[in-house]
Amino acid sequence: MKVAVGLTVITAGVAALALSLAAVLAPLAVLKLTFSLLGISLLPALSQGFSKIGQLIAGLARYFSQLGVRLLPVLSQGLSKTGQLIAGLARASLPLLTTGLRVMG
């Protein structure tokens, strides 16, 4: 069941990314088609501009990907320490809870 939920979340995330990418690329494709049909000569300059924007987006994606890979061990260690802290608090409060229940009767 947990695997199905995990796959569902991942699929939904990929679908959201695909829709956002389509929302960006579709207007650019329509603009390119319009310019080619009208024979406007600004297309090469715009194409280069879009190419540079695409390279910038790809560079940002690589940067954030590498950042995520570098932060993963730190986050893992932090979550592990948090789990240990919660377990320690639960172990420490259990005797107090049982004593309280004994006193109450």
Image (cartoon, helix red, strand yellow):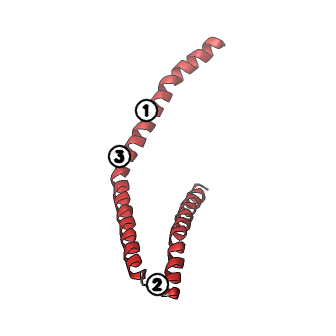
Which residue matches tag 3?
74
Percent across and percent down for residue 47 are: 40, 78
Say how many tags the image has. 3
Name which residue lies at 39% across and 65% down. Answer: 57
Which residue matches tag 1?
85
In this rendering, the answer to whether 51 lies above or below 33 is: above
Name which residue lies at 38% across and 73% down. Answer: 49
Disc 1 to disc 2, how far (Cα)?
65 Å
- Nearest the viewer among 43 and 84 is 43
Name which residue type carries label 3: Val
Name which residue lies at 42% across and 42% down. Answer: 79
In this rendering, the answer to whether 27 lies above or below 86 is: below
Name which residue lies at 54% across and 70% down. Answer: 22
- Nearest the viewer among 69 and 95 is 69
Percent across and percent down for residue 40 are: 46, 84
Sooner in the amino-acid sequence: mark 3 or mark 2:
2
Disc 3 to disc 2, how far (Cα)?
52 Å
Which residue matches tag 2?
40
Sooner in the amino-acid sequence: mark 1 or mark 3:
3
The crowd level at tag 1 (other Cα within 10 Å; few <14, some 14-19, many 20+) is few
Sooner in the amino-acid sequence: mark 1 or mark 2:
2
Horizontal side, residue 82 vs residue 67: left or right: right
Name which residue type carries label 2: Ile
Name which residue type carries label 1: Leu
Helix, strand or loop under label 2 = loop
Which-is-in-front pick, marks 1 and 3? 3
